[in-house]
Image: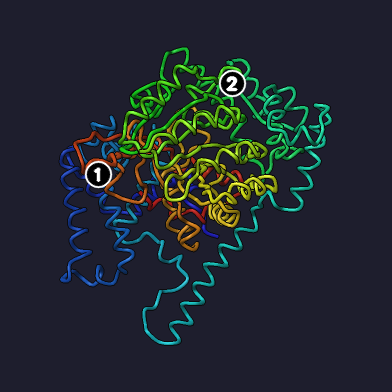
Amino acid sequence: MKKELISFSLKDLSEELWQSCPEAREILESSSSLHEARDSFFKYLNDLERHYFNIYSTERFKDIHIAEKHIAKECIRVLKNIIRTENEKLAGFSALSKLCAIARNQKDGLEDVSEGFLLEFIYLFRGIQGKSNMLSKCSCMLSLKEDAHAAITRSRELDKYSASLFGSFKKFKTGLDANLISRREQNKEEILDFFRASEADWMNPVWQLKNVINDHRIISRLTSLDKDEMDGLLAAEKFRIPVQITPYSLSLFNREGRCSFDRAIRAQVLPTEYYCDCVASKRISGESLDYMGEASTSPVACVTRRYPQVAILKPFNSCPQICVYCQRNWEIKDLARGQVTGKMLKKALNWLKNNRNITEVLITGGDPLTLSSGNLHWIIAQLSEMKHIKRIRIGTRTLVTLPFRINYPFLETMSRFHEWGKREICLVTHVESPTEITPDVMSAVKKIKSLGMNIYNQQVFTYYNSRRYETCFLRKTLKLCGIDPYYTFNTKGKEETADFRVPIARIEQERKEEARLLPGIERLDEPVFNVPRLGKSHLRAWQDHEPLMILQNGRRIYRFYPWEERLRIADDYLYTDVSIYDYLKRLERDGEKTSDYESIWYYY
């Protein structure tokens, strides 16, 4: 069996680098200066690009399939970006200079580069020469002939795509799995015994909130924790970082310890030691945790605005369950301190009332369903009196962390203000794992849908749900259960959430190679990157973002262009991604077959 490149040593990769493109080594080795190397390399890339799409080119270029030429064109464009002096200045690093040193076997050539750095250029060098090897992995050539045989052949090929999907789906479960239901029922009984509570208490959202679990001693008594999980909880206690888990959510944990079916659920609420150290360090240094720059997009307290017709209203600064990677971790507090003053809230509502350009309000926070039904009713009633507000969205995770909150008082409020043709009330939730979809969640969804209300899901694409076809399985589960996939968010680039982050290339790969195999009605979600201060940037378009540099540790630097750049002059945003190599090695340690992800290197 051929050894995978990610298993090569640094020395072996350096040899593979020049075997991938001897011409590149010759150019870099023979140049007398960095300036000469840059000019010669640009000429080489321009000549390649011209030959690929020139009808008078030699047979060597004519015989390359257009799909391979397309990959070559992408790689040429990326390499041109990387060797530009402007981008070297922006990045504070010259990949070209480092490649020159490696090509000349200089002492410091391989001194501070990672395997990820070399792999990025191995794949780029293969790509520019029309030797990506990606097409060899295709099972057959798509025929466009118009005859019965071609139709049958094509149908069989589509069958293989479906078989690939269904085969991968066997690795995953939903929370409707009979075995999971049984095990979680046992967990529930143990939790009720611990709290000396009844079934009626369990179904009562007030009881659930009153007994939110934030003590590592209680958590470890009710479920087995791995060492890293306990270390994280101890660090959270040390640095006073709030941890909150509803008894209901704790019942979804695997009682015997972390497993493939609850890892995403645990990771959301159990902070790592690294996360806690980063947050504490930023607090001490005075560095802002406000990654999205919401302080600069808040025209009045409790309101955030990044788009022309949409505003965010935040009436409560806590949640029944706090997500570790929350973009608002800088302002999320424990339940006892999450209250927003009535004066602040009234001022925010007054601002919304007087701004008739706002047609849609997202009530979020924190989680607004932590509020009492009376308080929530009052807020929605105030917004409903504003004739220019045509849609009220309620952003909440209680659907999966506290489904019993979808009770009669809440539903009565929704039915009163949701008026066909006049005003829409809808829910936007946040399901990360199909195992979060339980019978209790299904019951809550049915109640909401019976009112004619829509429910949308915003998934954060994290390491814990990024396995091959995992998000596809989630989409299918959501849609069958009455929840529409809405957005797939690239994980925020905050330093403290490094454990969750995946390369941008992986979310692009997922969309192109996996989501595209689903029926269109199941892949309604759009993959996006949330640019601080400016808002969402689509991740499928070159005109919205481009790679500028590959750092010595294998991390790509991207430039993002704001969504409104064609409407006004707007500054760009530079983002340093996580290393593809590090991501693949982590998958490998977790038992994934990394060859299934190899095309990730050709997504930019």
Q: Residues within 10 Å of mark 2 (few under 14, many from 20)?
A: some
Locate residue 313 relative to residue 585 in the image: left or right: left
In the picture of the structure, the residue carrying the numbered disc 1 is: 81
Q: Position of residue 360 (x, y in %)?
A: 39, 39
In the picture of the structure, the residue carrying the numbered disc 2 is: 334
Looking at the rendered structure, the secondary structure element under dot 2 is: loop
Q: Is residue 340 above or below residue 168?
A: above
Q: Position of residue 299 (x, y in %)?
A: 33, 24
Asked whether residue 461 is in view, the answer is no
Residue sitting at 43 percent across and 40 percent down? 579
Label 2 or label 1, whichever comes before in sequence order: 1
**Amino acid type, residue under disc 1 in the picture:** Asn
**Amino acid type, residue under disc 2 in the picture:** Asp
Asked whether residue 67 is in view, the answer is yes
Q: Is residue 274 above or below residue 437?
A: above
Q: Position of residue 553 (x, y in %)?
A: 40, 35
